[in-house]
Image (tube, grey):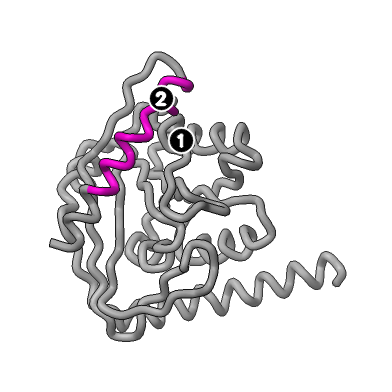
Amino acid sequence: MPADAGGRRIAWQARLGAALVRVLGLTWRMRIAHDEAVRRCRADGTPIIFVLWHGEMLPLLYTHRNEGVAVLISEHADGELIAQIARRLGFATVRGSTSRGAARALIGMTRAAERGSDLAVTPDGPRGPARSVAPGALVVAHRTGAPMIAVVASPSSCWRLGSWDRFMIPKPFARVRVAYSDAVYVEAADSHDAAAQVGRLEAAFALAEQRVNA
């Protein structure tokens, strides 16, 4: 397929995908829990690094639509479609991942935080293993001084795709509960030391999971 035809196809799919997310999201009954750390950071003007699991991206994109959050999206083949959908939902995008384009991604995320933007990172993306923590978000937190806040979503009913991340699509009219961890600041001597603190990020996810299921 010619490059321009491929680009038009992706643009059309992105328009359709964003519209479907909006329509489907309007039917969800959203419940936000334990967002005190988010509200505190925003009141103080402190950029946040949201960390979320790749498979829970859809309901969380809807939850934080039109907030100008800068989302880190991979440069793999499916990344362009996700990036265009995210932009149509009111997100900024930074391309790259811990496995491909890592240096450019780190620079882009750091610059976005310096402009005052919140960030969003999937530490198990772009290829998994699912729910495993790669250290990229920790390095960004160390470089920017911004806190990480883990966010999870739990729907009352959903479809799961057969992908590596078991991508979640809450069903129409599902109750979707979203919960957050406390803010986690990374103090480290250097990036290597920051990357070694994966246990702190795992603990943040565990707290968010506990809260979403409470």
Residue under the point 39% across and 63% down: 56
Residue 7 quadrant: bottom right
In this rendered view, identify the residue nearer to me: 192 or 142.
192
In this rendered view, identify the residue nearer to me: 122 or 22.
122
Q: Total label count?
A: 2
Image coordinates for residue 51, horizontal then vertical, percent: 37, 47
Residue 22 quadrant: bottom left
Image coordinates for residue 134, horizontal then vertical, percent: 47, 40
In this picture, is 201 found above or below 71?
above
Q: What residue would you read off at disc 1? A: 135
Label 2 crowding class (10 Å Cα cut-off): few <14, some 14-19, many 20+? many
Q: Amino acid at mark 1?
A: Pro
Image coordinates for residue 159, horizontal then vertical, percent: 41, 79
Q: Main secondary structure of the magenta part?
A: helix
Q: What residue would you read off at disc 2? A: 194
Residue under the point 36% across and 29% down: 197
**35 sits to left or right of 141:** left
Q: Amino acid at mark 2?
A: Ala
Kindly state the secondary structure of the residue where label 1 is placed. Answer: loop
Is there a contact, CB below 8 Å, between mark 2 and mark 1?
yes
Residue under the point 16% across and 59% down: 33
Label 1 crowding class (10 Å Cα cut-off): few <14, some 14-19, many 20+? some
Residue under the point 47% across and 80% down: 20
Q: Which residues are magenta?
A: 191-206
In this picture, is 87 found above or below 17?
above
